[in-house]
Image (cartoon, grey):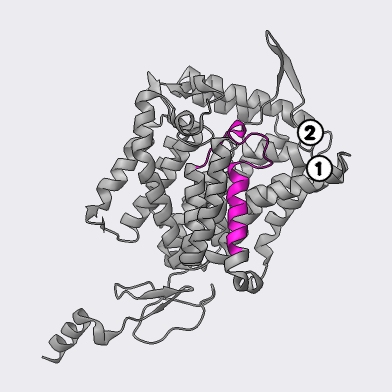
Amino acid sequence: MTMGQVAILVWVAVALMAFSSLRPHIAVLVVIVGGFLLLPVPRSAVGDWPWDKRQAVGLALLLGVLLFDTREVFRFRPAWVDVPVVLWLFAAPISSLTNDHGLYDACSALMHRSLQWGAPYFVGAMYLRSHQALRDCLWAVFLGGLAYVPLCLIEVRMSPQFQYWFYGVQLGAFDQTKRGGGFRPVVFMDHGLQTSLWMATAMVAGAGLWWLLRVRRARGVSMGWLVALIAVAWILSKSTGAIILGSLGLLLLAVPAARWLRLSIMVSILAYLTLRLIGDGLLEQVLVDAAGLISTERASSLQFRFTNEGALLDRFWRNPLFGASPWGFNTHVLGESGTGKLYAVPDSLWIYAVSLNGLTGLVGVISSLWIPAARGLGLASRWRRRIAPEVFVCGLIVMMYLIDSLANGFKTPVYVLIAGGLSRASPLRVAVTGQAQPERVTCRTPLQPRTAAGGVHRENVIEPRDRSSDKHSAWLRSRDRK
């Protein structure tokens, strides 16, 4: 048994212990964030097992929920916003059947995608639907990024070695870790680009807690210094895309009232996909020329991506509705080399979805991220000035992942979990008064912004603190009587 297999079995046991002893949404965050950060990625680390890191995390989530919180499963009710996810899940078996790969292949595709994407999304919809749960999720992302800082700094100096040290696995594309006279950290992730995006989102989560949620100190340490520490690792990760996305996230945090900017970004994502599908290549050339202004290496890398995506799009048009299925989507030969044939590589998530499962898969996977991000950014609410800060920051994180998916193909369960929570959470702030609040808050209720009164959150409702035990409030009342 390999170390990767042992780690997966241990993590399933850890998940069961977490669900048995912690609050459900805290257990979910421990399982999915911890598993994403610590479990091995390369399939060689788990041998011939039918699942890898992502499927193992999804399986651990399902086992924990079904064994320790069955009541919540039966309370869950699907909604219209779940349609894209269901479409993405069932696009896999339908594609297998339409390409004559048989029922066994269809069932296998559905199982793997359900563990990889469906489990994080629906568990997030069940447990991250309150503002308090989303705030805890931001803390989990921030602390996960903070824990990765020393590991990233070590690999920047010594090259990516943690997967070899812990699991005995060498990286398949070690040359891609060299960047700028040093190395790009990978730690326990698929690629340095995925690690860079994680550090960017962790920095944005910490900045959101500090700037919008007014968290000034964590365990006696200034939040500003902790965010700056993550920012150092973010810059040293040496990923141009992650640096741009992190800067964009910080900009939107600084100007939360610029709804037109958020709307423009979200619309541009759909416009980009449309032009890539039906365009004549002009957009690709413009982007390559723009990347050339940064460096010739960036332009060459982008041109390589577009060449591969063009080959896969040619294959997609043979079955545009349901794609080529896993056994045929990357069989397009680009040329010959000294070691054999060169096949097209699906670098981005969107090209992976459209070539694998056609337009059905593309609409499903993009909409399952775009709609929750739009809700979190306040684009679907007319009370745009009353968006809860934790919802807004989570919407920024999902938006960053969605933009990154236009160039990279990392299926990261943490972002899918957050998207599931945003699909259910009310985007509006919760009013805090001295009176009891309604049992639930809907998006149509005209609420006032939060005050500094504090309280305990429960399902988007704040219960006022007990004034008899609040010395500060008692002092204020005595001062008013004088």
According to the picture, the residue beneath numbered tag 1 turns out to be 105
Question: Is 140 placed left or right of 127 in the picture?
Answer: left
Mark 1 / mark 2, whichever is N-terminal: 1
Q: Position of residue 359 (x, y in %)?
A: 75, 44
Residue drawn where x is 72% and y is 39% of the image: 354
SS for callout 2: loop
Quadrant, the C terminus: bottom left
Question: Is 448 placed left or right of 310 in the picture?
Answer: left
Cβ–Cβ under 8 Å for marks 1 and 2: yes
SS for callout 1: helix
Please tell me how many numbered marks the rendered image carries: 2
Quadrant, the N terminus: top right
Q: Which residues are drawn in magenta? A: 39-65
Q: What residue occupies the far top of the structure in this picture? A: 338
In this orientation, which residue lies closer to the viewer: 14 or 441?
Answer: 14
Indicate the amino acid at tag 2: Trp
According to the picture, the residue beneath numbered tag 2 turns out to be 327
In which quadrant of the rendered view does residue 388 lie?
bottom left
